[in-house]
Amino acid sequence: MTAGCAAALAARAAFAQAVLPTSYTGPWQGYEPPSGWIFSGLGSPDYGPDYDGYNDGAAKLDDTGDFISIHYDLPAAAVSFWIRGLTFSGGTFRVEESVDGAAWTELAAYAPPPTNATFQTLEPSLHSRHLRFIYSARVTGNVGIDGISIAKSPFYLIERFETSNGVGRVWISTSDASRLYGLQHTTNLAMNPVPWVQVSSAWGNGGELELIDFAVAYPRYYRVLDVTPPPGKTVLPARAKTPWRGAAR
Ligand SMILES: [Ca+2]
Ligand SMILES: [Ca+2]
């Protein structure tokens, strides 16, 4: 393989994104991962019986630097997986998250991982778009990983907020053209349950989307979520605003 070809492949791997929700149960070593996923240095053969019950193997990480990474498209609510240490001693295994795929921060560290296969759920930052399971320092033993799934957050990250003349404008960075987005606010985050009120909604446009609150007051906290009606329910298009002329006949 030429250097240019390798670079092009690396670039394609770097840009491929998994669409949330995403999950993978196996088989692992020697198999093509889903789009946006990378398997690096996995040992052969996979562990069996596996941990998630799909009978398709658990991944074997058996050297320092072995990893499974996932690049995904939207804020994640949670990542779940099975983990097991096998004659593990002295090293460290980490689950890490990243905004850009270059700078990584620790989400969890296992020194050692549990000796029985154990189901874990972690909550990455809404800013993160990359997760990786990495054998950061091996001394003795291996780590088995299985049944990784990443859930989509129901909330969208508010990228910008501006107010002017009592009107608030909120932007989210990505939107899908076929989805309806709601802007909701509350004045009291301490209540249980928190009373959220929808102040406006807008159909996605495939890119950055603006949502407007026409009557900003403080304190006021916002969230943006997908409020697309389920199939079968239709939303009437907004009527053109015309001056009031009295009751229609
Ligand atoms: Ca499996
Ligand atoms: Ca390896």
Image (spheres, grey):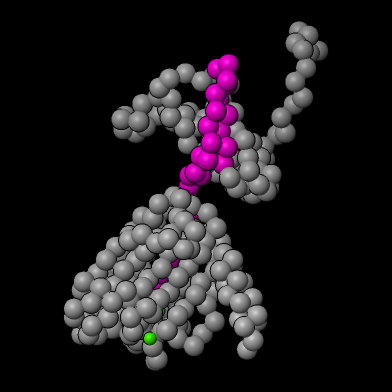
Q: State which quadrant residue 59 falls in.
A: bottom left
| Residue at the farthest front position | 3
Q: Residue at x 56, y 33 (%)?
A: 170
How many numbered circles does the render carry?
A: 0
Q: Position of residue 231 (x, y in %)?
A: 63, 49
Towards the viewer: 88 or 247: 88
| Residue at the farthest right position | 249
Ligand 2 is found in which quarter of the picture? bottom left
Towards the viewer: 64 or 231: 64
Q: State which quadrant residue 245 falls in.
A: top right
Q: Residue at x 38, y 55 (%)?
A: 124
Q: Is residue 200 visible?
A: no
Towards the viewer: 203 or 73: 73
- Image side of residue 190 versus residue 182, left or right: left
Question: Relative to residue 174, is residue 149 depicted above or below?
Answer: below
Any magenta on residue 165? yes
Question: Relative to residue 134, is residue 226 depicted above or below?
Answer: above
Q: Quadrant of the C terminus?
A: top right
Q: Residue at x 62, y 47 (%)?
A: 175
Question: Relative to residue 218, is residue 39 depicted above or below?
Answer: below
Any magenta on residue 196? no
- Image side of residue 121 versus residue 220, left or right: left
Q: Position of residue 241 (x, y in %)?
A: 75, 20
Q: Is residue 98 visible?
A: yes
Question: Relative to residue 214, is residue 69 depicted above or below?
Answer: below
Q: Residue at x 40, y 22 (%)?
A: 219
Q: Position of residue 162 (x, y in %)?
A: 55, 28
Region in magenta: 146-172
Most frequent secondary structure within the magenta stretch:
strand
